[in-house]
Image: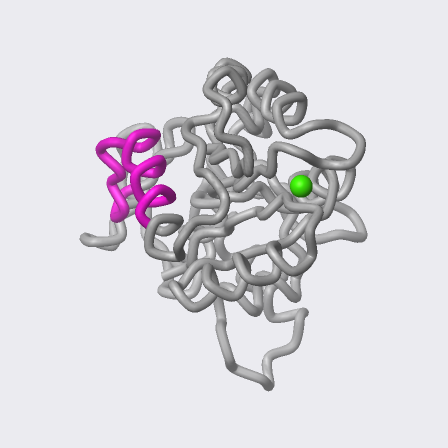
Amino acid sequence: MTSLRVLVVEDEPSIAELIAVNLRHNGFSPTIAFDGMAAQREIDTALPDVILLDWMLPGQSGTALARKWRANALTQAIPILMLTARSDESDMVQGLDAGADDYILKPFSTQELMARIRAVMRRRFPEAPSDSVKVGELTLDASTHRVSFQGTELRLGPTEFKLLQHFMRNPERVHSRASLLDKVWGEQVYIEERTVDVHVKRLRESLGAAGAMVETVRGAGYRFSAAALA
Ligand code: CA
């Protein structure tokens, strides 16, 4: 199971680090950004599953960032939890108006933070079919190990299945060969990056017409995109 990526946008290093440590301890995979620019870079590299967004940041404020991400098709579905030291109710309203899913007042306990993250995830993805993913007309069901495209079942090898699962759960972002090795193959040290290319080739073949969804990003790796089919 891949752990949920949490982007922590917080300019106070001690708080950011504390949150990251707690997230890691609770099975999440945190990344820290100290301002809006760094946060945008992180988002461009890999879309997070949840964003924890500090209200007061140097440069663009948390609400400005929330508004920007809500307006963008790629980021609009990512749950945003605002972190704020202020208790002024009008600020909260502003944060929620800007598109935040919830806010949490500093200081907060780890338990509270985890509960709030789980709650926003449940609200955003109510049916959260953790076993089944659908991108365009391609469907993957992890519980039955079945993949189908336009209603026709496809046959995939076990590695291709895992690779596709990772791609489908993380669409529209660039995956380097190293990150695919890490996320799909795990801790096996003696695998070369070229192995990834071999399995991607097999995956494309197995997918038939849907194979075009696995794009090669020259010099960077691969991207899984429903748009590539159109
Ligand atoms: Ca701050």
Along the line of sight, the residue nearer the viewer: 45 or 132 = 45
Nearest the eye: 163 or 64: 64
Residue 131 horizontal/vertical position (percent) = 25, 48
Q: Going 52% across and 66% down the picture, which residue do you hit? A: 21
Q: Residue at x 60, y 70 (%)?
A: 195
Image: 212 above or below 167? above
Q: Is residue 225 visible?
A: yes
Q: Quadrant of ligand 1?
A: top right
| Residue 213 can be seen, yes or no | no
In the rendered image, the quadrant that contains the N terminus is bottom left
Image: magenta residue range: 115-132
- Residue occupying image coordinates x 60% and y 85%: 190
Locate the C terminus by quadrant.
top right
The percent coordinates of residue 76 (x first, y second) are: 52, 23
Q: Is residue 123 magenta?
A: yes
Query: Where is residue 48, by image quadrant?
Result: top right
